[in-house]
Amino acid sequence: MFSFIPSDLKVLDRFNEYFISAAVTPTMDILVMHASGSESKVSPLADAVRRLVVKVSLNPLASLEKYIANEAFDTAVRAAANKHLGWEV
């Protein structure tokens, strides 16, 4: 058995004035398009989103075969983005 450490990739690409960063785990990939070139702000956001996805996936009634359509999850992700990236969404 091997252990896998989630890796936060640096800025992968640019789209106009935005940067695209990614976090890769065995179960999910998180892509973030942000205006700041700082990876130090994206890493805590990816960790917060990972924790939220794990919390939702532990629900036995949740179906993970499609996107998460939960208003509380959406609100929590937006709050994490506001906290870590300073987005007002």
Image (spheres, rainbow, N blue to C red):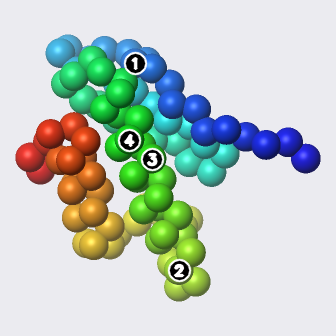
Task: Give how far apart the Cα atoms at labels 3 and 1 are.
Answer: 16 Å
Q: Which residue is labeled 1 in the image?
A: 11
Q: Which residue is pictured at 14% across the width and 42% down the height? A: 87
Residue named by callout 3: 47
Q: How many marks?
A: 4
**Residue 8 point in image, percent of width and height:** 51, 31
Q: Residue at x 53, y 80 (%)?
A: 59
**Identity of the residue drawn at 52% across and 64% down:** 54
What amino acid is found at the position of numbered circle 1 in the picture? Val
Instruction: Mark 4 vs mark 1: give the one in front.
Output: 4
Q: Which residue is mark 4?
A: 44
Q: Earlier in the sequence, mark 4 or mark 2?
A: 4
Q: Which residue is mark 2?
A: 59
> Mark 4 Cα within 10 Å, few/some/many (few <14, many 20+)?
some
Cα distance in 3D space between marks 3 and 2:
19 Å
In front of the other: label 3 or label 2?
Answer: 3
Q: For the residues marked 2 and 1, what is the alpha-carbon distance in whole angstroms?
A: 33 Å
